[in-house]
Amino acid sequence: MTHPASAAPSLTVYVEGIGLLGPGLSGWAPGREQLAGTAPYESARCVLPLPMALPPAERRRAGAVVKVSLAVGQEAVTASGLSAARLPSVFSSSSGDAINCHEICSALASGDRLISPTRFHNSVHNASSGYWSISSGSMATSSVLCAYDGSFAAGLLEAMAQAAVDQTAVLLVAYDTDYPEPLHSVRPLPDSFGVALVLAPQRSERSLAKWTLAPATCLTGTSATAMADSALEQLRASIPAARSLPLLRSVATQDTGSVVIDYLDGLQLAVQVGPC
Amino acid sequence: MDAVALPAALAAFDCRNNRLALLGLMQDGFTEAVAAASQKYGAQRIGVFIGTSTSAILQTELAYRRLDPATGAFPPDFSYRTTHNTFSVADFTRQVLALAGPAVVVSSACSSSAKVFASAHRMMAAGLIDAAVVGGVDSLCLTTLYGFNSLGLISTQACRPFDVERDGISIGEAAAFALLEPVPDPLEPLNDDAVLLLGIGESSDAHHMSSPHPEGLGARLAMQEALATAGLDAAEIDYINLHGTATPSNDAAETRAVAALFGSATPCSSTKGATGHTLGAAGGLEAVICALALQHGLLPAGLNTQQLDPALPLNYLLHNREQAVRRVLSNSFGFGGTNCSLIFGRAG
């Protein structure tokens, strides 16, 4: 199980499918027009669809975090033409189910401290990953990550490493939901946002873009690429999963070059992008 | 743990979970070993991968009791990012160790700090980093205590894995860390005490959020993949550190999975009778126990178990056994149907 550094695989992936949901963004098809500037972008409350792939009881109890992550995951996998049941996945979020967390903390601060079993199992950071696995029948591995504001970049690093090292297509889902008060005042995320990417080690007829990481230099002090549109730039800066927007725009505009996305304090991730 | 003081520059991280992390980091010359690795590879080339299930949610639970009665606002001393947020413990660990490379928290319930080995290994194999600090840290909070209680999964006494009268888990706390480095050139022989990460297997149950697959199908897939990546047959494993939570359903499902691959001869035990179930820290803690088993030639018995359940036909150890140990497997499973198996071996 040793992989000597000299044999490190090329860290190149092909983007096989995209799912997108956020304020004023209702899917990749309209989203790519908005990101390319060929259709107007106007912020509006994110509309979360019911997760129809879940059994009725789970569907009824699904919170925003499950709705947003399953919706974008399904959109991306459908676009890729691959089978969800065989795809390893990476789920990355700066926080779990925000409303569920508030309800649990409120109950625990009250007199009776009773919380329901459903509230408890929905409180785990891997709730979305678990529901994804149940609804898609996927028994493949799922990695569930958090890196605060850098959670999208952390997920991208994990997914690209997995695609290259294990030579498999990988589903990456990055998502955040907004907290109610009082948590909102200390973590003021304005809305829900989800993005999903199916990343494959080989090019196909569906490939939308080619992304490469240079292992020695991709972690950089260079500032993140900003969005030209001020409303989209505000969105990028206000929700961790929306830090993905410059990469999505580069797919929409068929750009070639370097796109830098936010990761940790003072450490950004540079991705070499190109069309297919 | 209450007496642990964080460095002044990191005071904002102060909470039970990060105090426990610091206490763990200060043991066994670990910070010195990381400092030496940092000199060798460069601080930017060492990643930090920490597993936790609840981070410092305790801070938020306590702050909800102190909300301003008029405005509902948090007390001014509450710091979300450096305590409650799931990433806090990896951020803290990275800063304590003065590292400057990638960092992430893996939070998949009770498989979290087993899966950090897999994430770190992939990043090393991809050439993104040269070495990694991996570990797990989880501390007591009301969410897990009342949550597991709501599911009827808390034992009435110290937990008894594989006992015929087992009745649930005992929640424990732990911080466990390991430094992963690449296997050096064969011309530089390894220290005999070095522990090798030989195999990794990961899977999902696709079955239920809080109950394991009754046949242990996901668990079996994880163990199978770990054996395959290690290039080993089941008969070459000398000891299995079971997930063994002492819930009726886990121990039954895990037995079916282990028996399907290993039969009933391989010595095995759950060390949760000794440590409690440390949730997101369990995988890391049990990896360290596996390392000790390899280094000392000691197969640890499962504590507290009085009468083995005859419906669980494994070679479950009720007494410590001293013998040469070359390869061991460790299981970690979690809510959401997440499974990870690791195989470790001796270098010498």
Image (tube, rainbow, N blue to C red):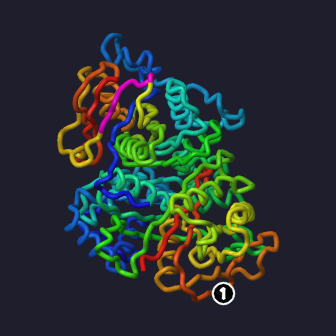
Residue pushed farthest front? B187
| Direction from residue A223 to residue A204 in the image, left or right | right
Q: Which residues are magenta?
A: A205-212
Q: In the depicted view, which residue is nearer to us: A24 or A245?
A: A245
Q: Nearer the viewer, residue A147 or B197?
A: B197
- The quadrant of the image that shows the C terminus of chain B is bottom left
Residue B273 part of the magenta-drawn span: no
Task: Using the rendered view, name the quadrant where residue A157 is placed.
Answer: top left
The answer to whether A157 appears left or right of B53 in the picture is left
In percent of the image, x 58 and y 64: which residue is there? B331
Does residue A86 appear in the picture of this structure?
Answer: yes
Secondary structure, mark 1, is loop
**What is the three-letter code of the residue carrying label 1?**
His
Q: Residue at x 39, y 63 (%)?
A: B134
Quarter of the figure that contains the N terminus of chain B: bottom left
- Residue located beneath label 1 in the image: B319
Residue A48: where, in percent of width, then height? Answer: 53, 26
Find the residue positioned furthest to the right. B310
Residue occupying image coordinates x 63% and y 77%: B273
Q: Position of residue B70 (x, y in %)?
A: 44, 45
